[in-house]
Image (cartoon, rainbow, N blue to C red):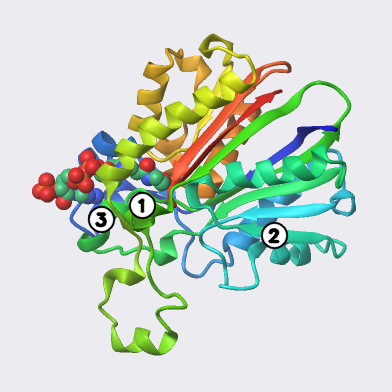
Amino acid sequence: MYNSKITGLGRYVPDNVVTNDDLSKIMDTNDEWIQERTGIKERRWVKKDSDDTSATMGAKASKIAIERAGLTKDDIDFIVFATMTPDYYFPGCGVQVQELLDMPTIGAIDIRNQCSGFVYAISVADQYIKTGMYKNVLVIGSEYHNNGLDKTTRGRGVSVIFGDGAGACVLSRSDNDSGILSSHLHSQGKYADKLIVKAPSIRHWVQDIAKTENDDSYFPYMDGTFVFKNAVVRFSEVIMEGLTANNLAKDDIDMFIPHQANLRIAQYIQKKFALRDDQVFNNIMKYGNTTAGSIIIALTEAWEEGKIKDGDTVVLAAFGSGFTWGSVIMKW
Ligand code: UT7
């Protein structure tokens, strides 16, 4: 068995900043409510006339990650792309990145696991490397949310939360003991309808769309309070699961990067695990919830700001639609 380690990180967010005050001009909401409930001050939203999509933003972040790994596109053996906002039903965004970066005809898969998408994606890449199948796997998390949100007052409980953006990393075979120690994945389809977008889908054919223009099922639905309550429980469980599997204690965590769903969730976990501010990295204040993009954008920013050092124990954890949740424990 080989070890796998992140050798390059990259991120890309659109230029267009949308503040809470901007949102209050198009729906009945306000900065105070959004900040108090979610911690979000602003988010990035792709502009209508922009070429940015989940695939193109993912490709931009990937370019940076590959360069920072000291590799070229031809060194990448496989692509794992996590998104819940693919450019098309099919094919997936992974194959688009393969084309956009002019890569050889390597394999590419999309992971459809919403907020847990990046954790699932990196765990998949990890297996390929540990077994010796691949040496360098490109792992991407990218979301273009705003085009699919209900931006009227009806959708305010969901639409104020989400932002657009992408992150990417190269996971490479490593000769030393550092790198990913383990990953822990779960799901509970029983609660699939608690955070869901029902249409368009194979059950809602395009012909139906014309007939039901006012159907709010075209927009994501979320039972926010229910999701919140489950999130804090599952986050704690899956972090403990990871620590225990590696004979680590809470005190061993040098950096915790939670999925950026809600600052209140991150703060709850921080308090529960008695972590200092410098042991947790949050950037939801600037970007909102970028779903599969959130952890990898935050990890990249934390690393860029020098907050992660060689030998650090880094914990990633996510929870979201599915329900799905997971953690990754790594030695940097
Ligand atoms: O990323 C995937 C996983 N997702 C999560 O982990 C998110 C988990 N859930 C949450 O973060 C929170 O539930 C929310 C931030 C989404 C909502 O906060 P909440 O404290 O649960 O609020 P609520 O939905 O219970 O709504 C409270 C009130 C309602 O008014 P009434 O019925 O009390 O009169 C809403 O209509 O706030 C109202 N409201 C708003 N007001 C202003 C809902 N959205 C807004 C808004 N602006 N944007």
**Residue at 56% across, 65% down:** 86
Numbered mark located on residue 191 in the image: 1
Amino acid type assigned to the residue bearing label 2 in the image: Ile
Which mark is nearer the camera, 2 or 1? 1
Amino acid type assigned to the residue bearing label 1 in the image: Tyr
- Image quadrant containing the C terminus: top right
Please report whichever mark, 3 or 2, sits nearer to the chain's N-terminal start: 2
Q: Which residue is the extreme one toward the top? A: 251
Amino acid type assigned to the residue bearing label 3 in the image: Arg
**Residue at 18% across, 55% down:** 28
Numbered mark located on residue 221 in the image: none
Q: Disc 3 to disc 2, how far (Cα)? A: 33 Å
Numbered mark located on residue 109 in the image: 2
Q: Are marks 3 and 1 in contact (CB under 8 Å)?
A: no
Name the element at disc 2. Answer: strand
Task: Please rate how many residues cluster around mark 1, counting C-alpha atoms within 10 Å: few if below 14, some from 14 to 19, many from 20.
Answer: some
Task: Please rate how many residues cluster around mark 2, counting C-alpha atoms within 10 Å: few if below 14, some from 14 to 19, many from 20.
Answer: some
Please report whichever mark, 2 or 1, sits nearer to the chain's N-terminal start: 2
Q: Is residue 168 visible?
A: no
According to the picture, the residue beneath numbered tag 3 turns out to be: 156
Task: Please rate how many residues cluster around mark 3, counting C-alpha atoms within 10 Å: few if below 14, some from 14 to 19, many from 20.
Answer: some
